[in-house]
Amino acid sequence: MEVTVFIALLGAMLVLGFAAASWRRPHDIHSLEEWGVGGRAFGNWVTWFLLGGTMYSAYTFVAVPALTYGAGAIGFFAVPFAIITTPLAFVFTARIWSVAHRHGLLTPGEFARARFGSPGLGALIAVTGIIATMPYVAVQLLALKAVLSTVGVTGEWPLLIAVLVVSLSTFRSGLRAPALLSIAKDILLAWVVVSALLVVTMSSGWQQIFQRAGGYFASTPSPGDGLLLAPTGQLGFVTLILGSVLSIFAYPHALTGMLAAKDRSTIRRNIAASPIYCLVLALMALLGFFALSEGVRPVNGDLNTVMPQMFHQLFPAWSAGIALAALGVAALIPAAVMSISAANAFTRSIYRTYLRPDASPGEEARVSRWASLVVKFGAVAFILALQPSYAVDLQLIGGVIILQTIPAVFLGLATAWFDWRALIGGLVTGLVASIALLWDIQQLGPGGTVVKAHFGGSTMPVGDTGATIYVGIVALAVNLLVVIVLTLLLRLMRVPRGVDATRPEDYVADVDDPTIKRLDEILDGLPTRPVGAHARRPG
């Protein structure tokens, strides 16, 4: 029964993915505007589900509970990270929406090129974004592999099935597929949350859950796990939060979901309401303790299977099938959006800039389709090469890399003071520092034995204090120092700056601005009256 329900629901999701190609009569699904960002025309509800499906992924429902199950309180870094993200996103996403719509931009690299007048900087940011996205896609594929392992499909070949399923759902339909699937995913997720609350309620209660989990952590040889953070773990916890908050804005897939919205007010309303998802995130993190107290054991020691195993053991068979399907879809949706955004970055900042400047919209879409496949297979390579203990490690490693684009992309929304040469120098320096620090991190097992000599995590020790720090913050500090110093030197030498193609008014333009063109065919219908900030001004 469990397997039947699981397969039936995933099959229905695949059908929806194919049907999305003709959803609401797209103007031209073969153009990059339609395939890559859904015609820049998603309304409130579609944007809500798409952003939720993209930002709250298998990372939320599989990786975070696995981390709290295996390491305790450190896994809760994802909750304050999601909360702090909201006010920053409320300000900066509206600005990037406006300037991107005014200039027809699709990717962070394109924005950096327009802002600082350097195609080379744009291409370097595109390459960095693609590399950083691959381990994030790998997190989703690991989650799907864990679900398949729970239903009895083991081995490495399920990863190839995951790649095939994601490819089928996006190659033809583009961003419309994950947008439509996100609606179905949230319906399934609502059932999972309600079911989990019922199961917890019928158990011994949270007091017993915490007592059992606390007793387990007290018996382990690791000094870093537990229900509370050890004093030496607090710096690492805070820097993980800070690094995650900053990196989420720089990922190409975050921009893709935002640019698909039809106006600024749609973005602002959805960002303002996003803390609702934080409640679900906190509950999923607590379920790691619940699974531990109930004696749930991962399949073959793979901690990513903890949540699927909990549903398998404690839910009725038909309900477990629904929960496992929800986890599977939660993995497929962000993987699809991430591969689309990385493909868009390659097409716009590399292919059209250096290889085919006169490429037609149809050719851009074809190149992006095939590039998205490369990203997915690259994610499989990351999994096979690194073999992380926690799926979160892959996301954090990607965060270390993408953080190095912060000066050009995130800070570039506020100022054009930096010189493009300094930004390239800082980015390269930050990337080199990131790789060097990640290479030097060991993964330690019980008793301090070295399990993995290199790329063993994303936090490094701080001297002999016992404390750790997220290496992404260290590399970003080096990056910013290089950018500031080089910019000052270039100013003193009076070296000509790059031409900023944007203007201050570009960052507040709304849908009713005459310089912004909207497609006639949009997913939520044309507005019946003017919308946006400009419409509220007299005259």
Image (cartoon, helix red, strand yellow):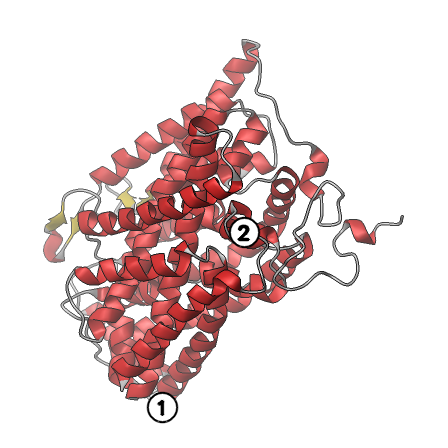
Horizontal relation, residue 394 to residue 112: left or right: left
| Residue on which disc 1 sits | 202
Q: Is residue 280 above or below residue 179?
A: below
Q: Is residue 523 above or below residue 327?
A: above
Q: Residue furthest bottom?
A: 202
Identified at 77% across, 63% down, the residue is 528
Instruction: Residue 346 in the image: state x and y as whole percent.
Output: 42, 38
The N terminus appears in which quarter of the rendering? bottom left
Q: Nearer the viewer, residue 141 or 366?
A: 366
Q: Nearer the viewer, residue 264 or 164?
A: 164
Circle 2 — which element? helix
Horizontal relation, residue 509 to residue 245: left or right: right
Residue type at tag 1? Met
In front: mark 2 or mark 1? 2
Q: Is residue 25 above or below residue 363?
A: below
| Residue on which disc 2 sits | 34
Q: Which mark is residue 478?
A: none
Q: Earlier in the sequence, mark 2 or mark 1?
A: 2
Residue type at tag 2? Glu
The answer, for residue 73, to whether it is visible in the render is yes
Q: Residues within 10 Å of mark 1 (few under 14, many from 20)?
A: few
Instruction: Residue 394 in the image: state x and y as whole percent.
Output: 29, 51
Identified at 60% across, 40% down, the residue is 104
The answer, for residue 242, to whether it is visible in the render is no
Instruction: Residue 34 in the image: state x and y as whole percent.
Output: 54, 51
